[in-house]
Image (cartoon, rainbow, N blue to C red):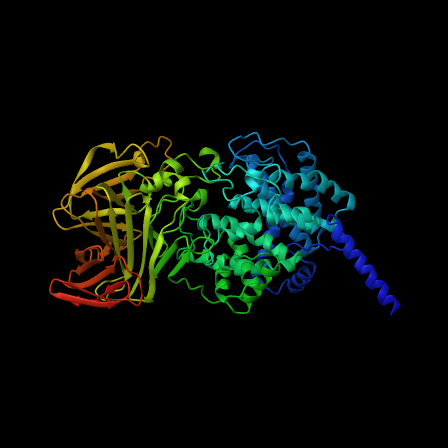
Amino acid sequence: MITYKINWAIKVVICLFLSLTPNINIGQEHPNLILTKTGVEKIRAELGNVPLFDSSLQKLKEEVDAEIALGIDTPIPKDYSGGYTHARHKRNMIVMQQAGVLYQILEDDKYAQYVKDMLMQYEGMYKTLPLHPKTRSYARGKLFWQCLNDSNWLVYVSQAYDCIFNYLSKAERKKLEKNLFRPFADHISVDSPQFYQRVHNHSTWGNAAVGMIGLVMNDQELIDRALYGIKGVNLDKTAKDDDGGFLNKDGKAGFLANIEEPFSPDGYYNEGPYYQRYAMYPFLIFAEGLHNVKPELKIFEYKEGVLLKSITALLNLSDSDGDFFALNDGQKGMSYYNDALVTAVDISYYFGNQDPGLLSIAAEQNKVLLDDSGLAVALGIKNGKAKPFNKQSINLSDGPDGKQGGVGILRSEDLELVFKYASQGSSHGHYDKLSFSMFEKGDELLQDYGLARFVNIGQKGGGNYLKENKTWAKQTIAHNTLIQNEGSHFSGKYDIGSQYHSELFFFDISNKKIQAISATETNAYPGTDMHRTMAMIKSPNFEKPFVLDILKVKSKTENQYDLPFYFLGQMIEANFDFEPASTMNVLGNDNGYQHLWVEGKGTSNSENAKLLWLNEGKFYSLTSSVNDTDELMFTRIGANDPNFNLRRDAALMIRRKDSKNTTFVSVIESHGSYSPVTESALNSKSNVLAVKVIYDQDEYTAVIIEDINNDQEVFILCNLDNNTTKEHKLKIGDKTYQWVGPYYYSGLTKK
């Protein structure tokens, strides 16, 4: 009993001492950040028994062994992205993290020694390292041209340090922490508050970097700085970053604020899927570290578990090939095969509800993390628990409270329609309210341009954003949405656009024969209201589902309206006369119009204009209701682009002049196929005979779609009332229509 009381008293004293001296590592075992001592023991016990884990380990070992054989190089920084010194330091951070993991799992000292030797080289360099010589960034780093990349480095190297912590002597750890890690963490935070003290994917990396090294060093000051931001720092609320976004307009900062603000309750990240993918690694890897070291924070439960929800949302923001939709600044081709999504899928499975659908994606990725989460995923796949990840039609709200618009995705058979009615999306947002893009089997047929940047290709602006990102990609004309008087939404000004968002009118996927989404925008052009409704309809007379697009515009003044459709593929035919341009003329002078060539102009002699094109072996048709004064223009991107920074993609644009209130209606079909092997074209013609607006008043808009069999389908939209239980009655000609809810769809009827 006396011994028990003494031991208990000692523990109390130690705990009190630790609480008063948070910078001391007494009692803290390593590894404890991502790998844990218990987890490593489990991994070692399973080696040779779990195929996907074993193959991931073997690939990593071969990769790291090859790097060790090359020797260590820590060059003096001088390059932008894509340059040698940038790429080398980026590679070093990854290899150090990997080598640390191999040391823990394989118990081979050569990996720890390699990490130690490289860290000592960085310690020797960093003590006297000035700011990076490239001055473009609003927050310059030291190893890299921007603090963002310095933060990337510290996130990875923190994990390496944790893995070899006990391999190092106390004196070596003190040297690294004093001369490298603490100054490094200070530079990206207290020395660079304009980078660190904000809500943005940049600061998420910074918060995670400072927090993770703080966890390894058991430095509570750094941990608190990571979670809550820098105490006592008040930034200029009007200051902006390189992309035109406010640095800290609302005064919020820290890792927790970066969870609270950008994520909606559905897990949508306001910058879009490309940057959500980029930010998910620091979000999740730091969260895993907090879970292991500070379990009392219950970080995976924060904001009702939004971090784990966000992974499901992000996966749903990809096409059937796994490529993310290029909303806002997004590079086409970025997919869930990226390493950040390997991390996301594994952590989501392990710390979430063990969704078997995630296992099927992990199997496609064909690699797992070499930690507890990766082992759990690999075991799940080995034990046959994987099931297909079922992407369905979904509406993802935007904004911290889910009340700032959103993104809707309609899916039917192999077709996917992406409809954006979200908030501005931080500094990476585009001026594209009520825009859409469309896919079939992973092939984009009506495109969102994405970003204007060649990431990490040094010859193209150092691999950074090109000026055309602002002059073209962000502008409204670069998207499939309405442009008024050749001006962008919100005049292309972030200060204005960031104040507003579109409003959901309704989202209905209750009937698989017709799925519909509708939203309104009243601020993009003062005095003009836009209301767009898109429906994906399965009809027995059509080979595949088709899309009905209704865009109603009401304005206080007469305007010129442009509605482009950026189609990908080869034009086959048009049903209207047009005059090809004998000389190339630019469409306009500003707001993106200066980048468009006019390749042809025409008008329609009928009530419909039809374009047919071929893309990836499939035929597509766009049938639009037009009048005889509408200009129909074929445009192509590439004017005023001397360095060929833009893709030479085409569009059909409907221009309607001197209009106050008007409605654009179109039908988009996928049909038939073409084989270059058999040289056979099947079902190459449109199935739509006519699209007619038969009623268009303030309360209702009614459309008839007539097919080549002379069968009809009627769609009626309630323009003002989205009540799902409201009864409606409307007489058009000699027919009376009755229904309940915000729209009516007749199904197939005889003419």
Q: Quadrant of residue 367?
A: bottom right
The answer to which of 328 and 616 lies nearer the viewer is 328
Task: Name the residue nearer the viewer: 518 or 182.
Answer: 518
- What count of labels does the image hold? 0
Residue at figure coordinates x 34%, y 59% from the top left: 410
Q: Residue reaching furthest right?
A: 2
Question: x%, y% of residue 472?
Answer: 36, 38
Which quarter of the figure has residue 439? bottom left
Residue 414 at least partly seen: no
Q: With 423 as the anchor, is 158 left or right in this view?
A: right
Question: Compared to 290, does 237 lie above or below?
Answer: above
Percent x, y of residue 591: 33, 36
User: In the image, residue 581 lies at what x, y percent?
Assistant: 20, 35
Q: Which quadrant is the C terminus positioned in?
A: bottom left
Residue 651: name its quadrant.
top left
| 4 to 692, vertically: above or below | below
- The answer to whether 734 appears left or right of 80 in the picture is left
Estimate the x, y position of residue 37 in percent, counting from the top left. Answer: 70, 59
Left or right: 276 in relation to 105: left
Q: Quadrant of the N terminus?
A: bottom right
For the question of whether residue 83 can be seen, the reply is: yes
**740, above or below 89, in the image:** below
